[in-house]
Image (cartoon, rainbow, N blue to C red):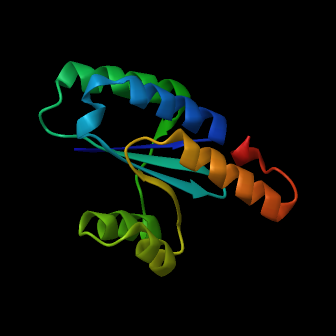
Amino acid sequence: MDIFYRFANASLTLRTVERLAQLQFVTDMQVTIVHQPDGWILRLELDHMVCPLDILDLRSFLSELGEVYEPKGPLKVAFWGLDVGESPISVMRQQQVAIVSYGLPNRIDIEEFCKEFIAGLGYCPATLV
């Protein structure tokens, strides 16, 4: 089961990743985090064995910070590419999307991405706050 959410900025995304790392069923979870100019997309791939109450609690938490998202266009193709085994680097090159983190929830990937992006631009866009 895939769950998609959109977050407005890096702070909300980091808060979500911290919460995901605390969950007991996180070992069965694949997380993909994508940065876009207007926000962050989070995809959670959950094992079908996860308790429905845990999923409901997770969705409630995610809805407090972000909004349900339906991928379209290149992003949808990018997720499909990851699903069929393409490497994140290959998918990023082909679909022109910024996959910030792939695998287990990883706060460090997001922080490093923000740091390098800001250094390259010379200023901090609202999505990286």
Q: Residue at x 86, y 54 (%)?
A: 123
Is residue 57 found left or right of 128 in the rendered image?
left
Given the current orientation, which residue lies at the most extreme left position?
49
- Reply above or below: 72 against 7: below
Q: Percent from the top left, x then y, of residue 35?
A: 58, 55
Where does the image place residue 93, in percent across and percent down from the top left? 50, 78
Please tell me whether residue 102 is drawn above or below residue 120 in the rendered image: above
Q: Percent from the top left, x then y, of residue 91?
A: 42, 73
Q: Quadrant of residue 61?
A: top left
Q: Nearer the viewer, residue 64 or 34?
A: 34
User: How many callouts does the rendering have?
Assistant: 0
Q: Is residue 29 left or right of residue 5?
A: left
Locate residue 58 relative to residue 17 in the image: left or right. Answer: left
Quarter of the figure that contains the C terminus: top right
Residue 9 visible, this angle? no
Question: Residue shown at 41%/30% (left/top)?
Answer: 21
Image quarter of the N terminus: top left
Residue at image location 14% in from the left, 38% down from the top: 48
Q: Is residue 90 above or below residue 78?
A: below
Q: Give the percent coordinates (x, y) of residue 60.
A: 40, 22
Residue furthest to the bottom in view is 94
Query: Image quadrant of residue 98?
Result: bottom right
Q: Quadrant of residue 105?
A: top left
Could one spot residue 27 in this view of the protein? yes
